[in-house]
Image (cartoon, helix red, strand yellow):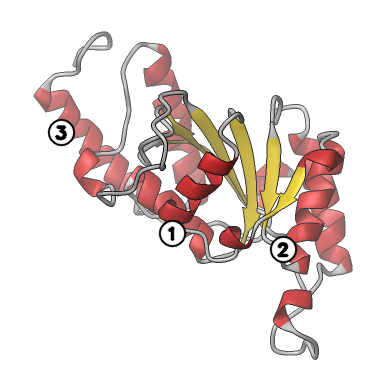
Amino acid sequence: MHLAGRPTAEACTARDTIVNAILASHESDLVMIASHWARCLRLSGFSLLAPENAIAPGIHAQRSNSRSMKCIFLRHGIAADRETWNGRDEDRPLTDEGVDRMRREAKALSDNLTDIDVVVTSPLLRARQTAEILAKALHLSKQVVEDEQVVDLNAQALAHILEEHHSAESIVLVGHEPSMSETIGELVGGRIELKKGGIACVDLPDRSVMHGTLEWLLTPKLILR
């Protein structure tokens, strides 16, 4: 296996097999291990990208732009139970526990989530509250933007969002399941699951193509450990 230059066909096959097997797992710790392993290989000059045939074809941003983009996906925190909530679903708020946990998560993440340009959130209350808590910890309260496209996010909607924020190089999206995990799966060619308050980072080497690498994934337990 070569760790510099173009990887061999054998290395590519091994890489794709391992990536697909790991991303298909529901074990978040396993995904974390894989992400650290991937980072080590990339630092050695080896490109660990999901297999191209696993990416949904034909999904591109409207304007070609070869600059890379960091897309950070954050699922909203613990919210009022859908079954017992009497109001509209879009008005379901974070619970007291959800607010407390998100504040602690945001504080724990603040030292590592640097150089964020914009926080784009679903307009639903529980997502807005989550976005505001994170933005406050990152000193980005004025960079919070609501966008209906995040409610039912997919790769095509993400391409539109990136086009609207074409000057940004790092973006946080705050939304809901299952669309957040499904969108990440479209980008990296695998399957993950974001817990409430879970967060993941996908690197798009070329933002004009919705095809990237899972950099890391953290569950709330790992964040608060």
Which residue corresponds to mark 1?
Answer: 182
How crowded pointer 1 is (Cα within 10 Å; few <14, some 14-19, many 20+) is rated as some
Query: For residue 13, what is the image quadrant?
Result: top left
How crowded pointer 2 is (Cα within 10 Å; few <14, some 14-19, many 20+) is rated as many
Q: CA distance from mark 3 to mark 1?
A: 24 Å
- Checking the image for residue 122, the label placed there is none
Q: Is residue 68 left or right of residue 93?
A: left
Q: Is residue 52 left or right of residue 112?
A: left
Q: Amino acid at mark 2?
A: Pro
Which residue corresponds to mark 2?
Answer: 123
Query: For residue 206, what is the image quadrant?
Result: top left
Image position, residue 133 (x, y; %)? 83, 49
Image position, residue 94 (x, y; %)? 81, 67
Query: For residue 99, what is the image quadrant?
Result: bottom right
Labels 1, 2: front one: 2
- Checking the image for residue 13, the label placed there is 3
* For residue 180, above or below residue 94: above
Q: Quadrant of the C terminus?
A: top right
Asked if residue 198 shows in the view, the reply is: yes
